[in-house]
Amino acid sequence: MTAEYKKILQSLQMKQFAPVYFIDGEESFYLDELTKFFETSILPPAERDFNMVVMYGKDAEWSDVVNACRRFPMFAEKQVVILKDAGSLKGGQEDLKGLNSLISYIQKPSPTTIFLMEHGGKKVDGKTRFGKLIKEKAVYFTSDKVKDDNIPSWVQAQGREMNFHIGDREAQLLATYLGNDLQKIINEIEKVRINVPDEKELTTQLIQKYIGISKEYNVLEFSDAITGNDRDKMFRMLTYFIANPKAAPMPLVVGLLYNQFSRIYMANFVRGKTDKEAAAAMGINPWFLKDITSKLNHWPLHRIERAILVLGQYSTMCVGIKSYTTDNGELLKEMVGQLLE
């Protein structure tokens, strides 16, 4: 939860409403959460039929939006007007001509209307007249994509919000398998929480039981075994993955190994720096650093460069390009053999 999002949410919960809100950005999770709050939590259920208007930019005319905002609420102090996909408001999409038609309203909004504009997928141009006005007159929130390297920290922060301690390893495991779909991550953590409401820690055992990610046989442990030169563990896991190919999809294994080898490669050039300086130079969270630097002795530069070339080759083969087989296990076995040469 970002500080700005939390600030806006807290003000809404305290019923400190502004006349106009504008939310945009590439990360849909926070936009969806805020929109849901406007739809379900500002007006009591008995008032929504008369005082809630939800419109979609692609279907609405700017005049319809203004008229909805200007009308008086019925038997209530406030009404809520929501314009979803605001950038598609009739009158133009890419240059926001439709939204420009709302400028006069934003300059002098109705005090009895709470107006939300949702502009997902992109950001409003702050250099335009409309963009400048929104940032001056409205409550403005932009939702940026969470970088892949920051997903584990985000997972841990969400765990704290749910009174669920999530360790570094567990957070990385969830990030590896669930990707950067924030809503999917929340859904999976909540699934565990529903089943074990009194647990204080999200352990690998709970992840395996309720989310289905094996504690022992997962691609994160597998890539660590390869880059950490733990051959006994690596061959044991390889045998399992060959027999259970769905447990280690090739694109996921290749992507994770590529990230690990890339970081080990970069670590060669930050020797002598403090942990904080090295992590900043590599663009990673500091808690990754110790694990990465511990693998430097196993992988001199020429081996890392060769490994990255091998991974590049198999990244195309695993999606069927220049591949002699569609057997996931066969490709995995062959790729690991070349990495260890």
Image (spheres, rainbow, N blue to C red):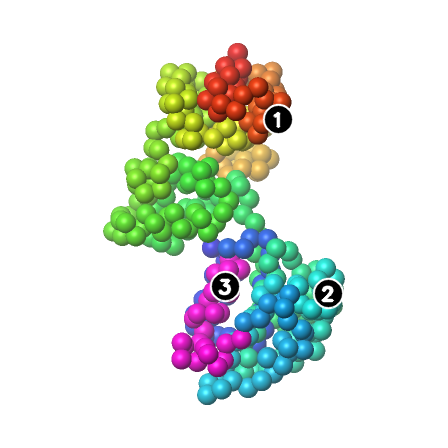
Q: Earlier in the sequence, mark 1 or mark 2?
A: 2
Q: Secondary structure at mark 3?
A: helix
- Could you tell me which residue is drawn at 71 percent across and 73 percent down? 101
Label 2 amino acid? Gly
Disc 2: CA contacts within 10 A as few (<14), some (14-19) or many (>=20) = some
Disc 1: CA contacts within 10 A as few (<14), some (14-19) or many (>=20) = few
CA–CA distance in space, label 3 to label 2: 25 Å
- Could you tell me which residue is drawn at 43 percent across and 27 percent down? 245
Disc 3: CA contacts within 10 A as few (<14), some (14-19) or many (>=20) = some
- Could you tell me which residue is drawn at 63 percent across and 81 percent down? 67
- Write down the region rendered in magenta: 30-53
Label 3 amino acid? Leu
CA–CA distance in space, label 1 to label 2: 41 Å
Residue located beneath label 2 in the image = 92
- Compared with 341, 7 (above or below) is below
List x then y, in percent, for residue 140.
59, 65
Q: Earlier in the sequence, mark 3 or mark 2?
A: 3
Pointers 3 and 2 in contact (C-beta within 8 Å): no
Say if the magenta span includes residue 50: yes
Residue located beneath label 1 in the image = 321
- Could you tell me which residue is drawn at 61 percent across and 63 percent down? 85
- Compared with 330, 57 (above or below) is below
Residue located beneath label 3 in the image = 34
Magenta residues, dominant SS class: helix
Q: Nearer the viewer, mark 1 or mark 2?
A: 1
Say if the magenta span includes residue 23: no
List x then y, in percent, for residue 50.
48, 81
Pointers 3 and 1 in contact (C-beta within 8 Å): no
Q: In the orientation shown, which residue stands out farthest toward the bottom?
A: 75
Q: Nearer the viewer, mark 3 or mark 2?
A: 2
Q: Is residue 295 left or right of residue 109?
A: left
